[in-house]
Image: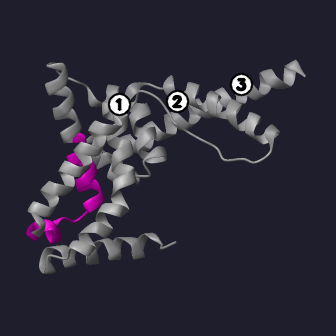
Amino acid sequence: MPNEIELHTSIFELQQKVSLHNSSSAFEQLYLLFYKGLHHFAYRIIRSNHIAEEIVSDVFVQLWKKRGDISNIKNLRVFLYVAVKNQSLTYLYKSKKQRVSWIDEFAGGSDLVSANSTPEELLHAKELTLQINHAVNNLPLKCKAVFKLVKESGLKYCEAALVLNLSQKTIENQMGIALKKIAAVLRQNEYLKGEGS
């Protein structure tokens, strides 16, 4: 697996190939690299696989149309997440004909999964997932959105700050709050389980 510097360099190299040489194969590599995360992100806001696919595809179509400028984008991942967020909000606004808080939509629920093998481990993982989901779903909305972007979508703090239009310090503080609250719920549940045995 490439490290962060190699990944950033390869993304930049792909951007250059697309921008300077109209390379459709480099563009396809970028698409494959970002599609899954962007689709998941759009789905968390829209709650429709089909519409999320359309939104991500539309963002990439627009990117291809403006491929001559792609080499000027400093952080393509953030650029794409912001574009998907904006397209998703536009869709929600048009479909609901009302102002929408995208953080409300994005922070709706958690899909944390575990892949353990034994039945006991699976049962424990299921219980743990339910506890974590409950803890995450009870976080304040901004805190929940930050947690999901960082932990589920895999964005770095600085990238999440750009996507959410918040300071990096706010992202750090919100992650600290989220992790403390989740840890407290897990400790409480372990304590209750210990009392029951």
Q: Which residue is mark 1?
A: 47
**Colour mode of the rendering:** one colour
Q: Which residue of the protein is positioned furthest toward the right in this rendering?
A: 197
Q: Secondary structure at mark 2?
A: helix
Bounds of the magenta span? 68-85
- In the rendered image, residue 125, in percent from the top left (x then y), is placed at 70, 38
Disc 1 secondary structure class = loop
Give the quadrant of residue 182.
top right
Please name the amino acid that badge 2 sits on: Val
Q: Secondary structure at mark 3?
A: helix
Q: Marks 1 and 3, Cα distance to the nearest angstrom?
A: 32 Å
Image coordinates for residue 132, horizontal then vertical, percent = 60, 32
Q: Which residue is mark 2?
A: 136
Residue drawn at point x = 14 percent, y = 81 percent = 21
Q: What label does residue 188 carry, if any?
A: 3
Q: CA distance from mark 1 to mark 2?
A: 18 Å
